[in-house]
């Protein structure tokens, strides 16, 4: 096992040593150490719940460790607070970016720096040049006067990075920075990361996407169950070895797709579906037990197609048949009655009741199928369904009474999936089923989908994660600018082919 201590000649700008943190008797971090060096990208990897988020919070001053120390420029601290962390040059760019949506790009870049400096009056005339200087120095094309609410996800992220540099950040932590970015936007971000390295910024990059980990980092530290497992140069890893260190087992990411008989009946038949401003003339069929991929760049129309099939954004043209019968999908109730389920992309705000228990969330969509002949709930049947799905989906929680807000991303996704499996739909659509999910949970979720398909459920996976599509889909439909432009089958379903067809 490689020591977490840096092998670089220069002194680290930040070190954490023997950090321990517990919550209510549960150990989140157990003696974790690592360091960051100027001009280096250091990736922090591990499964959900391994302690990554806790370590980031301790570095940023949002949490205090039980023991251990944080060393900045050779000076040891037993704990930081957010103000001290910012003054030390530490900036964290979280997944939600923490921007002010009603303010302009320029205002978002400079305002928090003004607050940190305790300025009483904000002057747009004086502050805007500071924002422009950072944007120009990084070679970006951000519209400084645009309201952040109207920006793409990629531009919001660039705004957050510029804001960090206005604070004279020497250490930037990027938490899952590519989750909602397209392939082209990821390349643009990586080019910016190289620019930051050239400026001598030390970067901690947190990601579940192993290909990106290997592409962008110089060193990798892996945590498992709150403990440091290994720190080594990224050149000494590949996808499989990182996954094994993260999970403690070999991960199978090969293509595992069952064979469908030629006469397998069609469950869903979509003909000439259209919605003005979103997509046009979409036609395809879905067979019983088939896993169909729906992919394309963000804004391609892929999500809008799924939302129309779920009745959330009804199509204006076209015909949809389920088991040969024409169905009207003017509302979500129509879709559910037709046997169509949908796991949305934003599972936290659209798919779950965060303050409710796992059990309540699981059963929320299938109460009618758990009633007695007199109309009351069959509590025995309800308990059996909840426990069956809790066990089958391997949800990691003390029990079914635990609140959903206490779960990791992977386990929260399993609860959303359980909610729909309890409803037993004929067709289940999943938008980004493994976004923000670690490699071990990803494999397990895809295995669950394969099992449901083997049992006769028809599944549509909406995703731009090419390896995920390759691993699980019988066919892949490529959507571009609202049009179905390619249908990939059999040997054509490869990572390179999917990415090429998406980017044409």
Image (tube, rainbow, N blue to C red):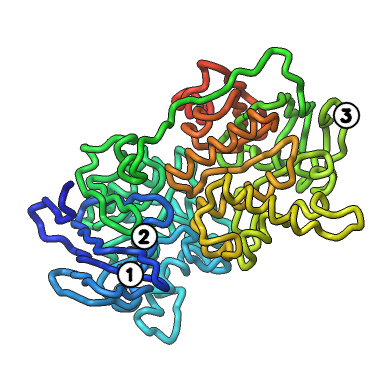
In the rendered image, residue 493, in percent from the top left (x then y), is placed at 52, 22
In the rendered image, residue 461, in percent from the top left (x then y), is placed at 61, 36
**Is there any visible trace of residue 14 in the rendered image?**
no
Q: In this view, does 492 lie above or below 435?
A: above
Q: What element carries label 2?
A: loop
Front in this rendered view, residue 501 or 179? 179
Nearer the N terminus, badge 1 or badge 3? Answer: 1
Q: What element carries label 3?
A: strand
For residue 134, what is the image quadrant?
Answer: bottom left
In the rendered image, residue 161, in percent from the top left (x then y), is placed at 38, 59
Kindly indicate whether the residue at mark 1 contacts the one at mark 2 (C-beta within 8 angstroms): yes
Disc nearest the viewer among 1 and 3:
1
Q: Residue at x 83, y 29 (%)?
A: 321
Q: Residue at x 70, y 29 (%)?
A: 456
Front in this rendered view, residue 406 or 83? 406
Q: Is mark 1 on a helix, strand or loop?
A: strand
Which residue position is annotated with label 1?
A: 21
Q: Distance between the residues labelled 2 and 1?
A: 9 Å
């Amino acid at each position: 096992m490689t020591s977490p201590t840096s092998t670089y000649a220069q002194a680290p700008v930040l070190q954490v040593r023997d950090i321990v943190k517990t919550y209510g008797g549960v150990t989140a971090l157990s003696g974790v150490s690592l360091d960051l060096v100027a001009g280096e990208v250091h990736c922090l990897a591990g499964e959900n719940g391994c302690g990554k988020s806790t370590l980031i919070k301790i570095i940023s001053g949002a949490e205090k460790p039980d023991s251990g120390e944080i060393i900045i420029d050779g000076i040891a601290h037993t704990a930081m607070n957010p103000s001290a962390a910012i003054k030390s040059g530490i900036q964290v760019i979280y997944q939600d970016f923490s921007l002010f949506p009603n303010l302009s790009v320029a205002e978002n870049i400079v305002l928090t720096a003004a607050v940190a400096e305790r300025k009483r009056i904000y002057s747009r005339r004086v502050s805007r040049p500071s924002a422009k200087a950072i944007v120009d120095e990084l070679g970006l094309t951000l519209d400084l006067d645009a309201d952040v609410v109207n920006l793409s996800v990629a531009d919001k992220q660039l705004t957050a990075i510029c804001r960090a540099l206005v604070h004279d950040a020497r250490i930037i932590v990027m938490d899952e920075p590519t989750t909602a970015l397209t392939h082209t936007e990821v390349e643009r971000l990586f080019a910016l990361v190289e620019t930051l390295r050239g400026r001598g910024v030390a970067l901690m990059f947190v990601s579940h996407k192993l290909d990106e980990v290997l592409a962008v980092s110089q060193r990798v530290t892996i945590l498992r169950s709150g403990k440091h497992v290994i720190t080594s140069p990224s050149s000494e890893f590949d996808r499989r070895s990182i996954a094994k260190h993260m999970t403690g087992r070999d991960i199978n990411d090969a293509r595992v797709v069952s064979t469908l008989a030629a006469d397998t009946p069609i469950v869903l038949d979509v003909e000439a579906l259209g919605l003005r401003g979103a997509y046009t003339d979409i036609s395809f069929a879905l067979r019983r037990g088939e896993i169909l991929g729906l992919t394309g760049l963000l804004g391609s129309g892929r999500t809008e197609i799924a939302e129309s099939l779920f009745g959330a954004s009804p199509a204006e043209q076209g015909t949809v048949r389920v088991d040969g019968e024409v169905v009207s999908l003017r509302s979500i109730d129509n879709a559910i009655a037709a046997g169509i389920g949908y796991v949305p992309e934003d599972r936290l705000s659209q798919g779950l009741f965060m303050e409710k228990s796992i059990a309540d969330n699981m059963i929320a969509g299938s109460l009618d199928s758990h009633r007695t002949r007199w109309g009351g709930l069959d509590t025995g049947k309800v308990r059996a369904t909840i426990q069956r799905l809790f066990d089958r989906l391997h949800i990691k929680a003390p029990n079914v009474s635990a609140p959903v807000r206490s779960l990791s991303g992977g386990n929260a996704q399993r609860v959303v999936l359980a909610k729909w499996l309890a409803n037993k739909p004929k067709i289940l659509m999943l938008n980004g089923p493994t976004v923000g999910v670690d490699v071990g949970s990803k494999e397990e979720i895809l295995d669950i989908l394969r099992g449901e398909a083997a049992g006769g459920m028809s599944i549509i996976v909406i995703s731009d994660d090419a390896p995920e599509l390759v691993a699980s889909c019988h066919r892949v439909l490529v959507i571009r600018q609202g049009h179905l432009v390619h249908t990939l089958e059999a040997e054509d379903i490869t990572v390179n082919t999917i990415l090429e067809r998406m980017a044409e």
